[in-house]
Image (cartoon, rainbow, N blue to C red):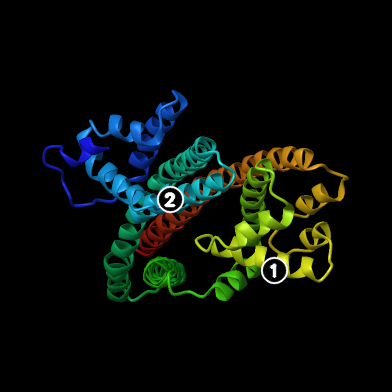
Amino acid sequence: MALLRHSLMINNTRKKLSLDQQLLFLSRLVHLLEQNYALKDALVLLYGQSKWQSIIQTLDDQLNLGNRIDQALAELSFNSKIITFIYFSLHHGNLLEGLRKSITIVQQQLKLEATLKKTIQYPIVLFSSFFAILFFVYFYIYPNFIKLYQTSGTSSPVLLIAMTTVQIIFLMTILTTTFILAGLIIWLCFRKKITLSFKLTLLQKIPQVKNFTRKYMSFIFSVHLSSLLEAGFSMKKCLTTMATYRKSSILSFYCEQLLTELDNGLPLETLLINHPLFQNELGYIFTRNHTQQLLKRDLTSFSHFLMDDLIRIVQKLMQWIQPLAFIFIAISIILIYLSILVPMLQLIQNY
């Protein structure tokens, strides 16, 4: 890597790569490693692309200091899922497989995020337009109707009901928007300060969130445990390795709990079946009389099933977003239209 030291000017300002760029960089690194390049030789070849020179320079510096590649990528603010998979892959001596898995998982995440953005973009535009209509109707049209009725010496119960209904919808829209924005701001400002116990309590109190979290935690546990078993680790060493990885705090916390209960003589399958944030099926896998190889195979298959389930849950949620938004807006617009039309017809009849 001496070439890196004597290269022309390098942009030393480290910029965080987007998730797309991280995946592109790692995909090309994987391609070179599959061609039997050594890691440092692969980095030298990738260094020829100017957009990655500062990234590769930092990686080289970190590796020369004796840091692991997961630590070097963490220094570059790579995605936590990528770093986690690489960390465990280093323990079973297969960096290439860890990179492949991390790329696959994060690519699935990006696809779901892109689909979600497309799904909510149109409803957001509609809600914004609808809010503008509500504002105009409530503050301009209805007051003019009231003045018109007062001038004619009559009143309209329909108009009063309509005003009350629109006022409720208007206030609900404002409160919902304010609540969502406040929640996002609070989360962004304090997510790093929220204690683990509070996170766990929150995850277990909301049924839909708990169901998704159980599947996700079972998936992560199965993937990492199967990769460590493949390296020939004992079950206790696998759990100890996962417990000592603090960047995945929830997994680490529960693995510590499992180790404590195992030391007290409780069987692992019983602990997993009764665990609040693991799928019961995960425990049943351990009830069979397994060799480590068969257990690793079953956990790998189970993790694939869980990934499919997680994708279906997100896709099902996205399928409901647009129809519900359209139904709500359509009914509200019809009611607003009637609230304007009916008083006008009553006024014409009175004249």
| Kind of residue sitting beneath label 1 | Gln
First in sequence, mark 1 or 2: give its number. Answer: 2
In terms of secondary structure, where does tag 2 sit? loop
Residue 274 left/right relative to 246:
right
Question: Gap between marks 1 and 2, in whole Å?
Answer: 28 Å
In terms of secondary structure, where does tag 1 sit? helix
Q: Name the residue under label 2.
A: 68
Q: Can residue 51 be seen in this view?
A: no
- Residue under the point 66% across and 65% down: 254
Instruction: In the rendered view, tell whether residue 274 sits above or below residue 151.
Output: above
Question: Measured from the top left, where is residue 221 in percent x and y?
Answer: 65, 52
Q: In which quarter of the image is the C terminus?
A: bottom left
Residue 148 left/right relative to 330:
left
Question: Measured from the top left, where is residue 255 in percent x and y?
Answer: 66, 63
| Kind of residue sitting beneath label 2 | Arg
Q: Is residue 129 visible?
A: yes
| Name of the residue lying farthest toward the right | 289
Which label sits on residue 257?
1
